[in-house]
Amino acid sequence: MSAASSSPNFNYGFPTPGPQTPSGQKVMNHVFFLSETEWKRVREEEKLDLIIIGSGFCALALAERTLDRNPHAKILIIERGSFFLPQHFQNLPISYQRTLGGLSETFPWTLSVNTAKQPKGNIQYQHGMVPFFGGRSTLWSAWCPRPTHEEMAGWPEEVIQAANRYFEDAEKLLNVVPADKIDENLDEPKLRRKVAESRPVYSKLQRRLQSMLKDNRHEIPSMTRFMAAPLAVGAGVQEGLDFAKFSTPAPLLNLIDRQARRAKIGEGNPLYIVTDCVVTRILQQEILRGESKEYHATALETSRGVLNVGDANVVLAMGTLPATTLVLNSFPQVEKAGTRFTSHFITSVVARIPRDAYSFGDELEELELAAIYVAGEDPRSKMQYHVQLSVLSDKNPEKFAEKAARYMPDVVATASPEQLATSKDHLVFVCAVLGEIDHDNPENFFRPNGGSDPTTNVTLQVLASDKDRQTWDTMDEGTFQLLERALLPKGANDKGLEYWHGEPNEGAWSQVRPSPTQRRVAGLVHEGSTLWIGKGNEGVVDLNYKLNGVENVYVTGGGLWPASGSWNPTLTMVALAQHLADKLAKRS
């Protein structure tokens, strides 16, 4: 490894001292990303095949798939933010938990007063964006279920079939492992105990709770299915680790290295990534196509100068709402963009049951985890919900605080140190419950407001409809049935189940169910549907993922969702991005 600086004429302190004020971003630019000089050269000289805006899941899926098929493809990824975390924050020391939220989350829209002023227990805001290299992939929960055909109700059949064809490839890319397979090789007690000394295990607790739920599924009338949680936690690029939350920075950096090696021996082209570059507008010109009007994206206006699109295809892989803002400001002729909005509302419930109430309680290791995905549906509206159930058996919370935080299946829905400290003799059940918002609600919208900044000149309004409130009631009751009937051992006394009341770090256990205002979370997640996909002009984007009326601009991500369902969207986003990569490869 060379210790030289970036300049051949000023190395090793000769003839004068070299640069004395390096920064992390400068180092990353020197090694991986485009420097100012290289960015200028790419803008002025390179003829690109694919321009991807964003560096999250869909960007990785597009670039990786395209370069696997054609290593000579010339791809540029444009990221608005700088380098922040090298991988998912749960893979880092526990202190990195403090990076969640705060300045790591931005809200590039104005929230309507009707939404912001809702009383507690209602929807009050939409969670924001993570404006850094890797985006939300460094902070996500990693749950990756495959939606069923029924759960994709309202989607074009062609898109459903495409998603099903690509799910397996998407799971490979994201390193998805069912929770009951993480430690399936630990049946031998001595081996399990040995592994448990270094990390929590997904073992007996996982299997026995799944068995209980199978036997008692009739206790939850609204439940449609359940399974061991599919988690993006395979070792992947991190050799030697058997559990690591997936994020895109490491795979993207590895992809840059791979393409650099290929380019050096003439077997490929470099993968270009520029950071700290905000795309503010896409310029277009009308193309003559007989009597029909078609437009062609010609250039990108960015915070670091204009980029000539040339013959490249442009893919919006930057998150649902920023992509919609860019479409609204760049392509006013595109109809219906932003007129539909979906997301997921949330209920959060933490409960505990004495460990000795379970016949297998004394067989558990000192620290065991379980993760189970439970899907359900309101019987009247047919609107969906699901429960992300994380369970901890922690006999020594003070000792295992760092390990539990590192390995918890859910990034946000986790037990607090205070909850665990008072539950050494209990199983702690953490329920993050997500329900779908009705995309037909005419009160919900995302539309321009005339502001001067083209990256934030939009207003978001989202309110719960009667159908949403009905679904919310059903999913809350289904959650209580899960805890009070399906997973509570028969014969447990009335004091066996308790709920946490209060803030995670300041509260108390009680037999009383938490009220709606206590359990219902103000913020929404998994926004979508603002650029939904449909046949012809039925949607905003056609079945080839192309923005209607613009011949070289394509869309990925949650904006494509015709209806949100309740399932976590990342796996489907990646599958459809891989499908888009193959479609574009065939056209080139």
Image: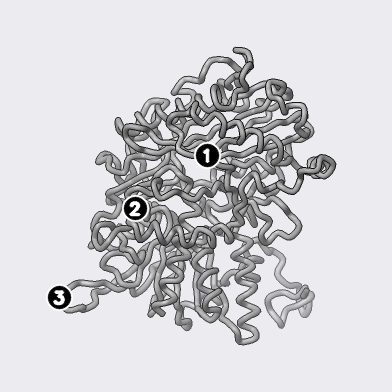
**What percent of the width, then of the height, locates residue 91?**
68, 49
Q: Which mark is residue 315?
A: none
Residue 449 visible in the shown view = no
Q: Is residue 303 above or below residue 308?
A: above
- Spatial CA distance of label 3 from label 2 is 31 Å
- Image quadrant where residue 213 sits: top right
Secondary structure beneath disc 1? strand
Quadrant of the frame with the C terminus: bottom left
Q: Residue furthest left?
A: 291
**What percent of the width, then of the height, locates residue 325?**
35, 55
Q: Residue under circle 1?
A: 226
Q: Residue furthest front?
A: 215
Query: What kind of residue is marked 2?
Result: Trp
Q: Residue under circle 2?
A: 155
Q: Residue under circle 3?
A: 291
Query: What kind of residue is marked 1?
Result: Phe
- Spatial CA distance of label 1 from label 3 is 53 Å
**What percent of the width, then of the height, locates residue 373?**
54, 40
Query: What kind of residue is marked 3?
Result: Glu
